[in-house]
Amino acid sequence: MVPSECHATRGRDVRASPIRARQVVIAWLVLYFPWLPGFPLNRWLPSVPFSYIVDANLAGEYALVAFSLVILTGWVGQISLGQGSFVGIGAFTTGILARRFGIPFPLNLPLVALVSAGVASMLGLVALRVRGLYLAVATLIFAWMCDAYLFSQQWFVGKAAASSIPNTVIGHPGTMTTFDLSNQRVFYLVVVTAVATAWYAAVNLRDSKTGRAFFAIRGSEVAAVSLAVDVTRYKLLAFAVSGALAGIAGNLIMTNVRVATPVVFQFTVSLFYLSIAVVGGINSLGGGVAAGILFAALTEVFYRVKTLTGWRDIVAVALLLGVLLGYPGGLGALGTATERRFRGVTKWLSRLIERPIAKGSAMLRRRRPSDGQIGTVTPVPVEVGDRRQRRPGTSRAAAFAQRLPTRRSRSPVIRRSIDLSVLGRTALEPNSAVDVREMTAGDDVETARASWRTMVIPPYPLAPDRSERPPVLEAEHVVVRFGGLTAVNDVTVVVREHEIVGLIGPNGAGKTTTFNAIAGLNEPTSGTVRLFGVDATKFPVHVRAQMGVGRTFQLIQLFPQLTVFDNLLVATHVHNPTGIFSHLALMSRAIASEADARARVRLVVEMLGLEEVASRPTAGLPFGILRQVEIARALVTEAPLLMLDEPASGLDNAETDELAQLLYFVRSQLGVSILLIEHDVRMVTAVSDYMYVINRGEPLADGTPSEIQSNPEVIAAYLGQAEEPKSAANDSNGRHISSDASIAGVEQGAEVLT
């Protein structure tokens, strides 16, 4: 699958897909390939040539290495030019375990995977400091070091510069349960099992919390870490998984051939493996299998056509250049495009094959009526926001609460969150201008969606004395220096419970730098940042996100490879307690957590009316929709403190007014506290309960919106004019204006600056 197809279905509910007839036929052909077409008619038809079976085993080994590169490079964006070294480490480690310790296959397979994963994790430590071209060079140097030094050590590869193992026979000789791995047909079953298992695990991983974290890191590390994704941990995890798969491929190569020499794993072989993954489609698991088959078939061609001997690397480079220049999606995208073009033919063939199977199933059901009762399963609707999932007599809130698993925090900090299930039972206020009876006569989801845009939201009942409100954020005397430049100097910002606090100032005043210091992207040179009463000054970004801090960015930081729904699913990362092993095996706990995450996302999607774009990739969507998606993602984190960096940027007046209504609604219904950076002074003064103004990195003023509106220092900072007496200020033409007109000057200055 190409990325667009991989993620087009990821917004669906977690459930088993029906097995189709063509899938059964393909699986049967793959499984019995070594015995076709001669079996069971081998008296009349010739069997598959022996060399074809050898090539099929080689294709499976290539596919495993391609999977490892798809996960590491395609999903996480970490370039590796040393994958062949992990294959070599897996092969030679297999020799050591079998020759010195007497551990045969398959008992040595998990040990080899662990060793390769450990070495890959150590290489992954380099990825924490370098990226892009520098990371590629670092992995290439690693491959060269393995080729020049590690693979020349006698303790590792053997005294004769070659490692060998005895033949492995599983079971008792002479019985039906005997598996002689020297038999290529028998070993083919081992390879198919390994590839199928790796495929199954990789697909489960891709559609899980871990897979979404991988794609988020590739899309934007800054946004990923702000959603509580531990980037360091998941990069190392990706290297470990990739190294384990490459090590398994090396184990199969050694078990199959039983001899490994260093020349087979020269550092240039890593480039050959990379070309396989790229030709298949660097994001596609299916493309990796197709490319493995293609390159194994080329090996057969080179074997049979003597004039092509020695041209394998040149042909591989030609295929690589052809894909890069002509079809960047690789074989995975080509297969999808071909299927779309011949969709009518494939549907006709599917109906032709499935019709007799359906008739046979119907006959069986008529013969055994009880089977129909046992096997009948009510399908779960797949549409985003489908309302048919509720049982009669139960409310949406009750159904949602029943689906929530028990949350277990692994974080050393106390995790705080709001209750998104409130959105499922939101009703219109009695003073709404909309006919309440007409709205509540329909579905409650439609009521929730319409209410926040149309209802009259009364002022939030804050304590009159601001000091009586419990503090949520206390950033005191924050100083941020970059070398000799002081970007923020002695800035203090306090957000109290259920407040909307505005942070304004001219362009370049240091607002976003202050935001980043609060969120942890910038470490303050001095000063303290307290979150919910805890000193978080030294906490990393993902830990602050776990504490309950959600944010948006001045420049939209969405994940372009993911759909809108999956972008929001990434925000459930902090509330998902499952780990990678439950994702690989698709355990019941992982399924329950995934269903919980999707239920939370659907509530926000329905509230904001994003159903029409939920299954679309974010690339190409209108700017206003992208702003809504980013705010929706911050809400899905269920963080009680939201930090919004210019959320109205690029919006027109109507969209800005709707945004202000949304902020009122989420504060009223969800009880969040909001710290807001905004250049639209009309909007920020309208929604804020308290405001801070900074200029040139230093605090200028703070107070209520009315106090800020009449502050001549603020007006002067926005208009770039000298300070005037407190009772008056000058407009941009030098004309004298009263303090009552100050807000107009502030708005005018803000418009000029933006």
Image (cartoon, helix red, strand yellow):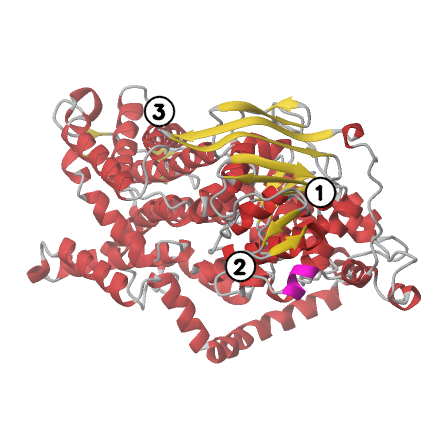
As helix, strand or loop, the secondary structure at mark 2 comes to loop
Kindly indicate whether the residue at mark 2 contacts the one at mark 3 (C-beta within 8 angstroms).
no
- At horizontal 63% and vertical 71% (from top left) the residue drawn is 358
The answer to whether residue 537 is left or right of residue 404 is left
Mark on residue 103? Answer: 3
The quadrant the N terminus occupies is bottom left
Q: Quadrant of residue 324?
A: bottom left
Q: 110 or 457: nearer the eye?
A: 457
Residue 149: percent from left, percent from top:
16, 26
Q: Amino acid at mark 3?
A: Ile
Residue 15: percent from left, percent from top:
64, 53
Q: Which residue is mark 1?
A: 707
Vertical relation: 413 (above or below) 290: above
Q: Which residue is mark 2?
A: 733
As helix, strand or loop, the secondary structure at mark 3 comes to loop
Q: Nearer the viewer, mark 3 or mark 2?
A: 2
